[in-house]
Amino acid sequence: VEDEFLAGETMSVYPNPASDHVSVYVGENRGFGTLVVADLLGNQVLQLPVTESNNHLTFSTKELPSGVYVIQARLGSRLYTERIMIAR
């Protein structure tokens, strides 16, 4: 099976570390999907839809305690994963 990963198909998460918000950019998005934020124990703390027209998402982290979180974007058969630190 050939890898479908093409140039430009990446996920950027910034700023890192973050204090009050996080922006996520999924480049060259060609479909619909879901962005999930979870703590390191696997507890989901946020879920957002990703669409072809909305591949740049910003969400507040003010309600999240300081710590490390995993951000996953599932777009069709592709899965992108990044870690982010929330620091106050």
Image (cartoon, grey):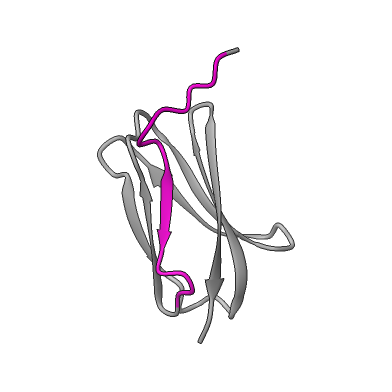
Q: Is residue 14 above or below residue 66?
A: above
Q: Nearer the viewer, residue 25 or 10?
A: 10
Q: Is residue 51 above or below residue 13?
A: above
Magenta stretch containing residue 28, yes or no? no
Q: Residue at x 46, y 69 (%)?
A: 16
Range drawn in magenta: 2-18
Residue lying at the far left in this picture: please name it.
53
Residue lying at the far front in this picture: please name it.
7
Q: Nearer the viewer, residue 82 or 34?
A: 82
Residue lying at the far top in this picture: please name it.
1
Q: Position of residue 7 (x, y in %)?
A: 37, 32
Indicate the quadrant where residue 59 lies. bottom left
Magenta stretch containing residue 10, yes or no? yes
User: What kind of secondary structure does the magenta stretch mostly adopt?
Assistant: loop
In what quadrant of the picture does the N terminus appear?
Answer: top right
Indicate the quadrant where residue 6 lies. top left
Q: Residue at x 25, y 39 (%)?
A: 53
User: On the picture, is 9 further left or further right than 73?
Assistant: left
Labels in figure, total: 0
Q: Position of residue 42 (x, y in %)?
A: 71, 57
Indicate the quadrant where residue 10 lies. top left
Q: Position of residue 85 (x, y in %)?
A: 55, 71
Q: Residue at x 34, y 41 (%)?
A: 27
Q: Residue at x 35, y 35 (%)?
A: 29
Q: Is residue 72 above or below residue 70?
A: above
User: On the picture, is 61 further left or further right than 66?
Assistant: left
Q: Nearer the viewer, residue 7 or 49?
A: 7
Residue lying at the far bottom in this picture: please name it.
88
Q: Is residue 17 above or below residue 43?
A: below
